[in-house]
Structure formats: C-alpha cells, structure tokens
Image (tube, coloured by chain):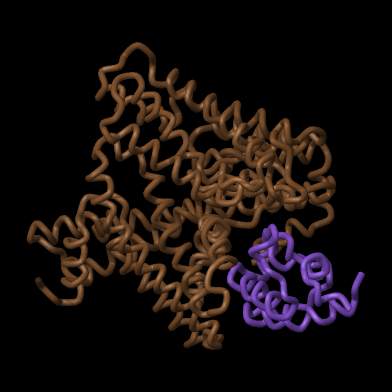
Chain colours: A brown, B purple
Amino acid sequence: MHLLEQFSSLDKNEKVISAIQGWHGRAALFVLCVLLFSVESADLFKAVLLLGLAFSFAYIPRHQDLVLLVFTQALGVYRIVNSSNYFNNDVEKVMAQEHVSSAAAWEISLFTYVVFIVLAWLALVYVRRNPQTLAARRPIWVLLGIAFALLIASSGGLLHGMARVLVWSFLVTYCAYIWFLAFALLDQSAKARSPDTEQLGMLHPFWGSTTLPYGKGAALLRKTRATTPEALAVTQIKGLKLLVWAICLYGLDTVLSYFFEIVLQVHSVENEISAYLAQHPSTRPQLILSLLWSQFDFALWFGLWGHMVIATARLAGIRLPRSTWRPLEARTMMDYFNRILYYFKELMVDLFFTPSFLRYFKKHPRLRMFFATFMAAGVGNMIYHFLRDIDLAAEMGLVELFSSFSSYAFYSVVLACAIGISQLRISAGHRPSDTVPGRMTAFVLIWGFVSLLQIFGDETRSHTLAERLQFLLYLFGITV
Amino acid sequence: MNTALHQRLRPYLQELLTQNMDFQDFSDTDSLFLSGRIDSFSLMQLVMHLEENYQIDFSAVHFEAPLLDTVADIAAFVREHGPSAVQ
C-alpha cells in the first residue's frame, strides 16, 4: 500500500522531478517507457520509434510546430509505404474491382495522401482569407458535403478504372482525416490561432489516434504544452504513470478475457444474436452475461488504448487530459460518456452540440438543450460512425451501406434521447444522490442501459434492426 | 482587473462546481474547464448565465471553450462582449 501511494504521488516528488530533468533520468525514463510500451504492442521497434519521436519532440525546445509537422507527416508516409496503414487494403479492394494493376496500392495511397495534405493546407488558407464564406462559417457541413459527394462519385457507378480508384483512395484518406481537419478549420477564426505548420502537424499527430482526434486540435495543444523544464518533467512522470496503468488494464483484460471467454464460454453479442436467429439461443443468464462482459470489455479496451495514446503525448510534453477516467463512477448518462470516451464526447460537443446550442431555440432553454444534445449524441454520433466505416462501401455498394446502418442509427437516436432526458432532469434540479445506495442505483441503471443498447450499437452490420429488436424482446421473455 | 466583476461571477461558478461535486476553492486564475472541473454541460449552463445576465450573443462571437477557462478569462470575455457588464 505504501509503495502504491509513493507511486501515485511520483509527479509530486521533488527528487524524481529533478532527476527526470537530467540526462541520466531522461535515459532511464525512456528505457522504462519503451519496455512498458512493448508489453502491450509486442513490438519493440514500434515502441522505440513512437517514444523516440515523443522524447525528441519534448527535448527540442525550438520550432516545435515544425518538428510536430515533420514527425507527424513522416510517420504518416512511413505507414503507407510499409503498408501498416489500412488505406492500402481499402485501395486494393477497388483496384481489384476495376482491374487496375498499373500501380501498387501504396503508390496510389501515397499520391492521394500528398494531394490531401496540400488541399488541407489550401483549405486553411482559403478559410482564413475568406471568413464570410460558407466554408468558414459552416466548415463541418461543408466537409461532410464533400465526403458524401466523394462517396457518390466513387461508389455510385459514375466513375470507372483508375479514375474511380483515385477518387476512392482520396475518399478513404479524407474520411480518416475529416475530424482533424474540422478542428483545424475551426481554429482559423481564433485570435491566437496556431501556424499552419502546427495545424498540419495535428492531422493524426505522431503520438497516435484513430479517426478520433486524441488531443483534439491545435487550440488544445496551445493550452497544454509544457513550457518549463519542471512542467515537462511532471508531465512526463504523469505519462509514465498512465502507461503503467494501461499495462495493468492490459493484464486485467487478458485475465478476464480468459475467464469469461474460455472458462465460462461467454460469446460475443453478435454470436449470440446469430445463435438466436438459428433457433439455438443460449440461456437468458448467458445472454445477460454476454452483454455485460462485452460492455465491460469495450470499456477496458477504450481505456487501455486511450491511455497508451495520451501517455505517449504526455511523454512528448503535452499535458492532455485522460481519455477515460473512472467510468464505473458515472452518475448520469452524460457523465458516463464524459468519463469513458472523453475525446469522442469532446468532438461531438465542439462540432455538433456547441454550434447548435449557440444558434437554435435560444428562447426555449429546455428545447435548446435537448436539441443540441440530440445533434451531438444522435446526428453527430451517426455521421461519425458512418464515415469511420466508409471502407464498407467497396464491398457493399451504396444501397447496402445505408440500409445496413439502420441498426446503428436506431442506437444513436435512443442514446441521444436518453442523454437528452438525463440532461433535462439535471436542468430541472434532479441531481443524482451522493449516498452509497444512490451511487449503486446510478451504476446499475447506466451500465444496464448501455449494455442493453449494445445489441443495436454493434458495428458488424451482420444483422438487421428487426432481428436485433427480436433478440431484445426474447431477452425479456417475449417471442415474436 | 475588474474585481467587482470577478466577485459577481464567482458565486455562479461555485454553484456549477458544487453541482459537479467539487467543493474545492478556486482562485481567479485556476483552470476550471481544461482541468475538467467544469464539464461541457456545465459550460453551456455558464453560457446561458452569461447570455441572460450580461446580454452576450454567443452566436455573434467566436466562441471556444478555453476562452472561459478561468474566472479571469470569463471576466475578460464579458468585458469584451457584454456591453452591460462593466460598470
């Protein structure tokens, strides 16, 4: 217990803070972090590469915007050339459909990536110079309009051969970067906006991300960069602590996965739905266990993955808030999303909630809050996941792509209504009780609700909305 | 520095923090939003409070959450955008 307390207060220990500022301390910290990072990734080279960039960024005090740009873009190109990027697989699928073999998939991916980065830079310049245009006033909707135009052009039967391959390749690149670019465009009207080098360096920054910008954009970077050697050391120690916690979660997930999936033979929700539809349903306790374990496993993985990314950013000297923070203690629906998916919630709030809240129904406070919440948790959530899985268009075609999304759309609407009602209750003064029974009730209600909703939120698209509704009814003893 | 404005803002911010079960004191320069002490929902409640009490039209100004991070930031924002705020 004493050791645990010492470790948790490591970032307040003057001796450690001082040691980390010297070369020996820095070298020891680097080696320790590489070893910890390798435990999860099982890839020493990747650990050395990523943490090498992070530590180099932290210790190069001048021209950090340029360093960020070079590191981020070099890593982006490296991943395409080494096919460790999913773009190449997506491009290969359409190349095979169009019988295009005159270039390698990575060459096409690289070409469209370079074109995208140049166009992204030109978009920043355009928006800055033309603040009254639609692109400057409504950048999100313009970006989404372009995405759907590219989708129709590449998958609507309008283009063929190399032309389709190139537009498709641009689309998958564009959709992977759209939310990063959105933050960069929004920042153009800020008084203290960052230089373009930094904006382009934040397009999938080197410390890691998915299609979700961990660390948001340059606006947050400006506020969270450690500016003194002592602040840098403290930030790096916080990064180390988070890395250690991520490895603990990795160990916990490994043990629990073995226990639930091997020992108890708990199947995934999708497999349970398939078994139900094949007239071989599991018992209801098994189904409930499947839902609960799937939700808990999801939370563990998001926590683990987010901690690895944020730890890397902190080791680079950026004081980013954690992605996941004590999700089991959530007391309202909004609190749950704030705690479990902080950067996703921030994306939804910044790009959908806030603009809606500031513009519409200003004379109707409750409707205003509900509408803005619905735009974020419903509409924004739907659009985010639709564009995230845009690669499915190559296999499914446009019609199937949209129709198979109905289940997730339903999930988003129900979730948005639940969060909206939760928000309205809080506005009306209904605060969650701080007593132990009150906390237990909140835990059961929130985790029970999100576990059940998972029936519709699964993203495999292998079952229709009607089939999932049937499964839900069966769970409550109603057979259709 | 407009200390009167700071003092007018503080009780409402204290109420927002209390809603988030945060009973710690805060200085005029302590980070409230970026530190996570005030969440996005509470930030929007703050926006409504500023609209109602200081006649700020948020749809007409460039708004980003870090602009309302501390008491001093909020006071500066009100001074800049709220005509009825500074007396």
Tell me if residue A310 can be seen.
no
Pick whichever, A310 or A66, lies toward us.
A66
Q: Position of residue A311 (x, y in %)?
A: 62, 48
Q: Quadrant of residue A414?
A: bottom left
Q: Position of residue A57 (x, y in %)?
A: 72, 35
Which of A466 and A288 lies nearest the eye of the viewer?
A466
Q: Is residue A139 left or right of residue A321?
A: left
Going by the image, does B27 lie left or right of A169?
Answer: right
Residue displayed at 60% across by 51% down: A137
Which quadrant is home to the N terminus of chain A?
bottom right
The answer to whether residue A35 is above or below residue A367 is above
- Check the image and report above or below for A26 versus A375: above
Residue B23 picture quarter:
bottom right
Please indicate, yes or no, whether residue A416 appears anywhere in the rendered image: yes
Question: Residue A207: x and y, percent?
Answer: 60, 40
The C terminus of chain A sits in image quarter: bottom left
Q: Residue furthest left?
A: A279
Q: Position of residue A128 (x, y in %)?
A: 68, 41
In this picture, residue A200 sits left or right of residue A259: right
Q: Is residue A424 above or below residue A344?
A: below
Residue that sits furthest to the front in the current view: A132
